[in-house]
Image (cartoon, rainbow, N blue to C red):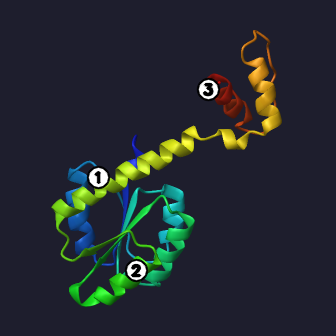
Amino acid sequence: MNNSPQKWILLADGNYSNRITLRHNLEQKGYGILEIDTCTNVLTTVRNQEPSIIIINRDLPEGNVIEIVETLHKSEPQIKIALTFNKEDMLYAAKAMKAGADYCLLLPIDIEKLEELLKSAVEKHIKILQSKNNNFEYLISSNVKNMLERIAPTDASVLIEGETGTENLLQKFLVST
């Protein structure tokens, strides 16, 4: 991945020409692009790569797009979902919105409107990731917090032992108190 994973976009479209056109336009604007051409690997790719937004085509083969939208909406609510569809698929787009899609984009996609949508989605995603990274206190029990708050103002040396990440977590808490 690159230095700003928050700007990754997953293009899930069975139509090669749609993917190429979108990829070309979005890469020029500085977005990293992940591509999938079937439903089968969408969930795995999302969990492994955590893109800011998924642009998924209504006609993505080998699965049920509505079910994927519903699953992602429940399991990965921080990731925005945009469904692309044709004019005759308005009812399908409404079902996708009900299932949890954040946006519906009529094909052919207006790149200017897409850019506005992406800026907004990426900003929201970055804020969510930042709040996740800064909200670590809920992981520390109140007894441990009380002890750390008493130790923090002193010059005492403390040995911290625990599972991987424990030392970092407690150091963050000490610095923030």
Do the numbered discs 1 and 2 sit on residues whose CB atoms are within 8 Å?
no
- At label 1, the amino acid type is Lys
Q: What residue did someone put label 2 on? A: 96
Answer with left or right where residue 98 lies relative to residue 176.
Answer: left
Q: Which residue in the rendered view is the most extreme toward the top?
A: 155
Dot 1 falls on a residue whose secondary structure is helix
Mark 1 closeness class: few <14, some 14–19, many ≥20 residues within 10 Å: few
Residue 12 location, x and y as percent? 37, 71
Residue 52 location, x and y as percent? 41, 56
Residue occupying the point 54% across, 74% down: 71
Looking at the rendered structure, which numbered label has been put on residue 41? Answer: none
Report whether residue 59 is seen.
no
Residue occupying the point 69% across, 43% down: 138
- At label 2, the amino acid type is Ala
Q: Is 169 in front, or is 148?
A: 148
Q: What residue did someone put label 3 on? A: 176
Looking at the rendered structure, which numbered label has been put on residue 119? Answer: 1
